[in-house]
Amino acid sequence: MKDLASLRRRALLLMREAMTLLDQAGEDLAMARLQAVLDTVERISPMRPPGEELPGDMAAGWPDCDRPVDPVLVRAIGGALSVIATVMARQGGTSLEEIARLLGIYAVVNHETATEEGMVIGCWGAMLLDVVEAHREGT
């Protein structure tokens, strides 16, 4: 049986090393995403002004919600958004990377006031980045 604490420590060490390499490569977006993962693994709660409470006590995990997020619906809308953004990019209006970047910014801003919505929008931005990578690889 594997020692889970040891595996966790090793994963954290590797992620911190990856952060350093990403910093040297100028990959700011990837660094921000990896930092969010590190914060999650280390159970670091989101920063907030003193005295401000987070709904559902975010330090304990996903907030309580009377409308749970449907992963199928999130993926379906994200897929549709990817198709629309691809068509827009082909027509020269904007690039997929720009749309994904803007969604990422909007997700972060939205996450401050509406956690679940921000996470869903962030997921859509990540799906667009997957499409960008697939286009680069020619798949």
Image: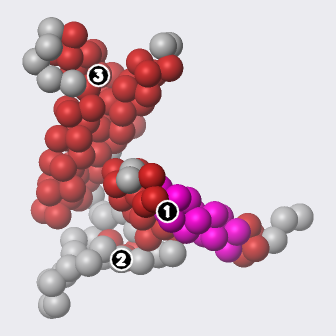
The reply to whether callout 3 and callout 2 are in contact (CB within 8 Å) is: no
- Which mark is on residue 45? 2
Label 2, secondary structure: give it. loop
Closer to the camera in the image, 51 or 136: 136
Q: Is residue 23 left or right of residue 70?
A: right
Categorize mark 2 by other alpha carbons within 10 Å: few (<14), some (14-19), many (20+): some
State whether residue 133 is above or below residue 64.
Answer: above
Q: Amino acid at mark 2?
A: Ser
Residue at horizontal 31%, vertical 64%?
A: 63
In the picture of the structure, the residue carrying the numbered disc 3 is: 82
Q: CA distance from mark 3 to mark 2?
A: 31 Å
Q: Which mark is nearer the camera, 1 or 3?
A: 1
* Along the viewing direction, whichever of 119 and 100 lies nearer the viewer: 100
Residue 107 counted in the magenta span: no
Q: Which mark is residue 19?
A: 1
Tag 1: Cα neighbours inside 10 Å, few (<14), some, or many (≥20)? many
Place of residue 66 in the rendered image (x, y in percent of width and height, measured from the top left):
25, 54
Q: Residue at x 17, y 64 (%)?
A: 112
Residue 111 visible at all: yes
Q: Nearer the viewer, mark 3 or mark 2?
A: 3
Residue most toward the bottom? 51
Q: Nearer the viewer, mark 2 or mark 1?
A: 1
- Residue numbers of the magenta segment: 9-22
The amino acid type, in three-letter code, at marker 3 is Ser
User: What is the quadrant of residue 33 in the picture?
Assistant: bottom left
